[in-house]
Amino acid sequence: MPRPADSVDPTKSPWHLLGAALRHWREQQKASLDDIARRAHMDSSILARYERGDRRPPAEAVQRLETIFGAGGILSALHANAVASTSTPVSPAPAQAKHADDMDHLRRQLLAGLALTGAAAALPMDGIARLRDVVDDRVGAAGVEEWEELAWEYAHQVATRPLPELISDLSVDLLTLQKAMGSADTAPAAWARVNSHITFLLAYALGSAGHARESRHWWASARRAASRAGEDMFATVCAFEAVQALYEDRPLPIVVARAEEALAATAGRPCGRARPEPRRWAPARMFGRSSATRKQPSPTSTSRPASTSSSRPPSRATTCPV
């Protein structure tokens, strides 16, 4: 009879929380360590150490496990949080050169990861991210304009990219954005707007992927972020939450409350080129039409600035945030 697995305390550290999540997803599939390790191309003893929090998995290993478990970006988000919680703060002064040993380790990590790319079909993303940090130390980090363009691009990808992949990227970039905002000393309103936009998109993507519980928590975070970014952004977040809540069969008072918050924030002003379809969703629901027959709108379909119909991203001057 196999010995029971050692217990994991997820409150001990972010790495133990990630380990507990890995074990949870494995046990959900009723799979053994050997089964998952074989599919992930790793030794079962190493996977066991990941689960116990005794060893820190690299990003590429987490991505392979994410795909196997179908975790929808949750494991990648937990890994990004663990990395951020334990990484050494970067000095604000431009770095002239990294320590020779660190650079050599990074070089070996990249070469090893790239050598395995053909077999594992996964780039060494952890090493690539570290390399970007080295470059940004020399040339400067992204400004708010680059983040605005990224948020605009994500809004267009909601309807086209696989949701697990999108959720993973949104989670990592949202974490990176928090670091950028912490060191930014200009344009606080623009940074608040970008933060609200990406938080809102993550909430929407999680709900669209069927992660209702996580989505509800992220909608609350998105509303708080939007309250610092202006009435138009707050109205958009509340309106999209109301629509998604309707599709998820959340209690009708919550749906109505979000809709009323959106209307109050805009004082009746239209946002962009809103289309009339939302008025028909509630009647269709009351007449018993299945939610499977209604196509949920994307953040670029019901409320968007006129310039999003072109091939260029909208300027910061546009009034509708999505």
Image (cartoon, rainbow, N blue to C red):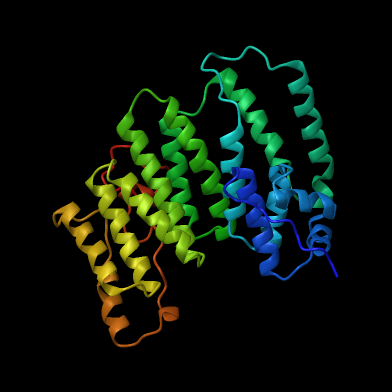
x%, y% of residue 210?
A: 50, 67
Q: Is residue 94 above or below residue 42?
A: above
Instruction: Give the residue displayed 53% in from the left and 47% down from the top.
Output: 171
Q: Is residue 162 above or below residue 251?
A: above
Does residue 42 appear anywhere in the picture? no
Does residue 9 appear anywhere in the picture? yes
Question: Left or right: 67 with respect to 81?
Answer: right
Instruction: Give the residue displayed 85% in from the left and 52% down from the top.
Output: 43
Residue at the limit of the structure toward the bottom, as seen here: 287
Residue toward you, 198 or 8: 8
Residue toward you, 91 or 141: 91
Q: Is residue 47 above or below residue 69?
A: above
Residue toward you, 299 or 78: 78
x%, y% of residue 41?
A: 83, 54
Instruction: Give the residue displayed 69% in from the left and 41% down from the top.
Output: 125
Question: Left or right: 48 with respect to 95?
Answer: right
Residue 102: quadrant of the picture: top right
x%, y% of residue 9?
A: 62, 51
Residue 128: quadrant of the picture: top right
Residue at the limit of the structure toward the left, as seen here: 267
Residue toward you, 19 or 122: 19
